[in-house]
Image (cartoon, coloured by chain):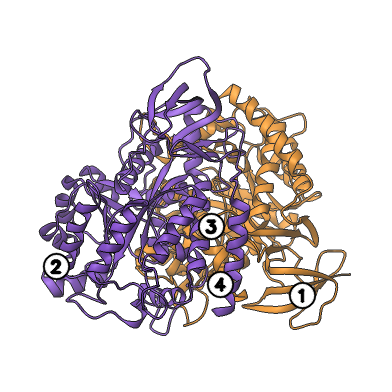
Chain colours: A orange, B purple
Amino acid sequence: MTTLHAAHALVEDRIEADVTITFGPDGRIEAVTPDTPPAGERIAGLVLPGMANLHSHAFQRAMLGLTERAGPEGDTFWHWRDVMYRFLALLDPDDVQAIAAQLQLECLRQGYTAIAEFHYLHNAPDGRPYDDPAELSHRIVAAAAESGIGLTLLPVLYRHAGFGGRPPTEGQRRFVLGLDAYAALCQRLAGVTRVGVAPHSLRAVTPEELAAAEALADTLAAAAPRHIHVAEQEAEVADCLAWSGARPVQWLLDHAGIGPSWCLVHATHVTPEELARLAPTGAVAGLCPSTETNLGDGIFPLPAWRAAGGRFGIGSDANLTTSPAEELRWLDGIHRLLQRRRAVMPAAPGRSIGLDLFRAALAGGAQALGRAAGRIAPGCVADLVVLDPDHPTLVGRPPAALLDAWLTAGNPTPVRDVMVDGRWVIRRGHHPAAAAITARFRTCMRRLAARL
Amino acid sequence: MTTLHAAHALVEDRIEADVTITFGPDGRIEAVTPDTPPAGERIAGLVLPGMANLHSHAFQRAMLGLTERAGPEGDTFWHWRDVMYRFLALLDPDDVQAIAAQLQLECLRQGYTAIAEFHYLHNAPDGRPYDDPAELSHRIVAAAAESGIGLTLLPVLYRHAGFGGRPPTEGQRRFVLGLDAYAALCQRLAGVTRVGVAPHSLRAVTPEELAAAEALADTLAAAAPRHIHVAEQEAEVADCLAWSGARPVQWLLDHAGIGPSWCLVHATHVTPEELARLAPTGAVAGLCPSTETNLGDGIFPLPAWRAAGGRFGIGSDANLTTSPAEELRWLDGIHRLLQRRRAVMPAAPGRSIGLDLFRAALAGGAQALGRAAGRIAPGCVADLVVLDPDHPTLVGRPPAALLDAWLTAGNPTPVRDVMVDGRWVIRRGHHPAAAAITARFRTCMRRLAARL
């Protein structure tokens, strides 16, 4: 049994003082009690639930800066995707692990404690399976073992280049697995880490393949996560309409078993009718505002979604930023600008504007990862971050304003300590494997540079 | 004569290699020559012109996190302003200097080399002048001497609580100076630092007072900067219309000598007609996107402004972030979302999307500060920042992508070295006064906490 005594902690919807938190060797919190005398390890600062990062493509971290150029056909998402395809053709297994470990380290430092890796890189550059078809998935698992982040691995089912079962392009050959190979991959991985299924998008799987992925999920774990990219681009919506007469979210609602184990990533271009049907299913909207902004995707109607009781979480996606605070600023900020007010949702006088948004993202993120997390409460795993009250961003703030200060301020990060599953992975800013991870990442990036 | 030899540098609109930069003891660049053999001090990395921060209220840095709550009357800018008024009543001269030095240090670390401090805190908390009426202005100057940032001090003329010469409120009593006292203050300060005038807003000065400030500016220096808050809030536009029949920008165009020495801060709520008249004057739009977002001000029509040839720069304003890269991401990102494309302005294939935006902000910022800066070119002062090519954000990027990577990535900052006026103020991330500045800031913040 481990006992922490936090100067302050977020317990449900309140910042409490002198909070004793106990958890067992399995990392599960057993008791949380405010207003207690010191006992166990004393933690100065504000203890918060760690955030789940519900959508990451780790390797895109290594593309930083390479895509900020228009192509011959314009400055679109689709040109960005071409650059991305060319880049990923360069990556070998060592690269994948080196980049993922650095990315996860950066996420931890900024306050994410768990990550859902939407992993679509399966095959060798020539499109053939590696000797071990799970080679690259195992590299993601190995990276998480090094970084200590809580991993939910989402092997991606990618079969086609467009609606109606169009054959994949050459740029997609590293993604494509047969249904049997995909099932074998997921089942093997389920023995070593938390796994969910990820049919890539309605562009990339047929209705039959989607149904197969759903059926597979049921064999992996109870309520295993199911993630899909949906309605990120207007062209995708138009293509889906042309193919089926329905918009992508509408199609999913009509044909898939959308419910709480689903995460609909992006869902940018949704109609009020789609929102009204989707929210009661309990599915999570997987919002990736920093990436959606960079890509010019469009604006998810968050206020309407929240008003309808919809659940959401945040993902770093292309990994331009790894700060949950920055991600939430983007998510919230765009609606502050559009609504011309400071609180996107009605805020009671005196109540923190950011707290409810933060808690909602914690809950939705944990749900999307299939992880009992997102709260400091009995039964949850001890995924915790501690904000340093002496950090220049926070020093002198009243306890109730520490979270607000973190969420509204630009970096540098005031996250001081990070615990995952009851184990400290960062103490006083120090991660024991950081120097090795970053040194290897630098070597990898310099090697890649020579191949660009 | 000092000679630097940069591995890469931004020279006009190109990233050049092996650039020799020479400057004299006055910090003015004398020659810039790409493709040269090594000579003088060798600088690994990408050398960029330092960014001018054209709008700061330093003390608001110390309010971080205190304003994220709705008031009894709602979640408006005006409630935010009430909190700000209560906070600034707490500050003594030592606080003002301690906060300003910390803020300037943070700006330097993130890549700003100069700052325009829109300084409206003149009087003691009881509204009476200090024994030295320039006490607080001198504290800003003293902070800049400690931090080494290039300062343009803009003492603010604040006379009234609203249009039509309404008397100031109690919350404004630290701001109010008579015209003679204001002129004396500006003239004294012009002997010690770069100075401009800042009639606070059309709410806060009458037409006669505005004209007096303009006339005063002409006595301070050739083309001394003139800054004014304008059209940030819709209520201000409505009040201005009720008072004069004209919108604020329209009124200024009709009644003030708007030209290149003017900076119109925010200018959020402008019509196409106002933009079309304003752009050819050469005035700078002072855009503060991170603050305007936090406050829910609204969206400045940047694409139309740039299409009209309008000049702009960026300001950190409330100092939630001190990163010019983050500020530019906000500025650009909102239009990526609204336009649903990646380049807000038409971008030639293969050309960096961010480079032109960055260069425009450099030029507009330097102009607004009255500083011969913003370019690495003969005649400009050597205000330089160096991006560390070994930083995890940048390692392995081709030279042409280093700037893009910096601009698109979240923190931590890859700024390694900073030079102001030909003198290094940060070397390898180290600022010699940083420890002392931050220690004093912490002491100040803890003292303030006791008074909150």
Task: Please tell me if label 2 and label 4 are on a single chain.
Answer: no
Chain letter behind tag 3: B
Which amino acid type is marked by label 1?
Pro
For the residue marked with disc 3, what is the amino acid?
Gln
Q: Mark 1, residues whose alpha carbon is within 10 Å: few (<14), some, or many (≥20)?
A: some
Q: Which mark is residue A2?
A: none
> Disc 4: which chain?
A
For the point 43% across and 32% down, the residue is B25
Establish if B322 lies above or below A168.
Answer: below
Determine which residue is flagged by label 3: B102
Vertical side of A285 occupied by B418: above or below: above
Name the residue that disc number 1 marks.
A378
Residue that mark 2 sits on: B208
**Left or right: B436 as drawn, with respect to B54:** right
Q: Nearer the viewer, mark 2 or mark 4?
A: 2
Determine the CA span between mark 1 and mark 3.
Answer: 41 Å
**Mark 4 and mark 3: Cα distance apart in space:** 27 Å
